[in-house]
Image (tube, coloured by chain):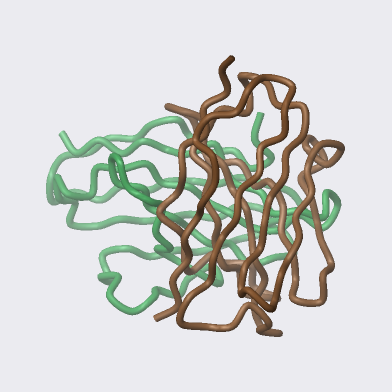
């Protein structure tokens, strides 16, 4: 069963860049039938779709975050990554990576999530 | 403000049935598949329903989904206290070119 694992700093200073990586195990990130997603959930709040990337490198971002977000993929490491620039307290959340199915868009596999705190 | 609209909360007694609605538009639910996710307290969201009305392996048939026009519905029958969770609908929005979620509905089993 394919698994996803987020990794990265749990603490980021305001105005700096948040960087997270999702490692795909027991499966290939180069699948043409799936794509790779970042989602976040602020404490006590709902889910927010950040963006996604296909194995081709094509990306789609939430318009509300697109000016600060970059998602990239490294097939050689079976990883995809998230960068959010100029973070503020509003970016504090649990960040999840997930796998989406092309054409039907359900997210069938999720990572355990990683909490990112924004504080000086 | 979520693109998809869900009631913030619903409640019902054990054994009863509850319905959770998810309202969207022609740029999302109206033309795309809807999925539903269950997030038990302190856990990772789990896919509950995909392609509007299909259940992944291991999801009991007490959970069912449907879609009509620009709205979708999640029905849960034979409620159990273990069903207490937050439920989210999700789909793709062809105007925004991104995935979208509803704001979530907290289910309380009284």
Q: Is residue B101 left or right of residue B79?
A: right
Q: Residue A23: x, y in percent?
A: 54, 66
Q: Quadrant of residue A111?
A: bottom left
Q: Residue A73: x, y in percent?
A: 73, 66
Note the chain letter of the brown one: A
In front of the other: B54 or B99: B99
Total numbered circles: 0
In front of the other: A112 or B10: A112
Note the chain letter of the green one: B
The structure residue drawn at horizontal position 17% and vertical position 57%, both measured from the top left corner, is B78
Q: Residue B9: x, y in percent?
A: 38, 31
In front of the other: B17 or A58: A58
The structure residue drawn at horizontal position 46% and vertical position 37%, both measured from the top left corner, is A115
Q: Residue B2: x, y in percent?
A: 65, 35
The structure residue drawn at horizontal position 63% and vertical position 77%, both measured from the top left corner, is A29
* On-image quarter of the C terminus of chain A: top right
Q: Is residue A59 left or right of residue A34?
A: right
């Amino acid at each position: 069963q394919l698994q996803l694992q987020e990794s990265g700093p749990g603490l980021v200073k305001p105005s700096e860049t948040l960087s997270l990586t999702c490692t795909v195990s027991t499966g290939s990130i180069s699948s043409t039938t799936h794509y790779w997603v970042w989602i976040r959930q602020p404490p006590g709040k709902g889910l927010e779709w950040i963006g996604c990337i296909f194995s081709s490198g094509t990306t789609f971002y939430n318009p509300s975050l697109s000016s600060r977000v970059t998602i990239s993929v490294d097939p050689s490491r079976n990883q995809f990554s998230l960068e959010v620039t100029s973070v503020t307290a509003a970016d504090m959340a649990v960040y999840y990576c997930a796998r989406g199915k092309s054409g039907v868009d359900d997210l069938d596999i999720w990572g355990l999530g990683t909490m990112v705190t924004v504080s000086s | 403000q979520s693109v998809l609209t869900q009631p913030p909360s619903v409640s019902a007694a054990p054994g009863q049935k509850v319905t959770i609605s998810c309202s969207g538009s022609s740029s999302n639910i109206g033309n795309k598949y809807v999925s539903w996710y269950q997030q038990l307290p302190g856990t990772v969201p789990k896919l509950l329903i995909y392609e509007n009305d299909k259940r992944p392996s291991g999801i009991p048939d007490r959970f069912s989904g449907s879609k009509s026009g620009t709205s979708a519905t999640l029905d849960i029958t034979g409620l159990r206290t273990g069903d207490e969770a937050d439920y989210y609908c999700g789909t793709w929005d062809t105007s925004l070119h991104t995935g979208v979620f509803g704001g979530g509905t907290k289910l309380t089993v009284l």
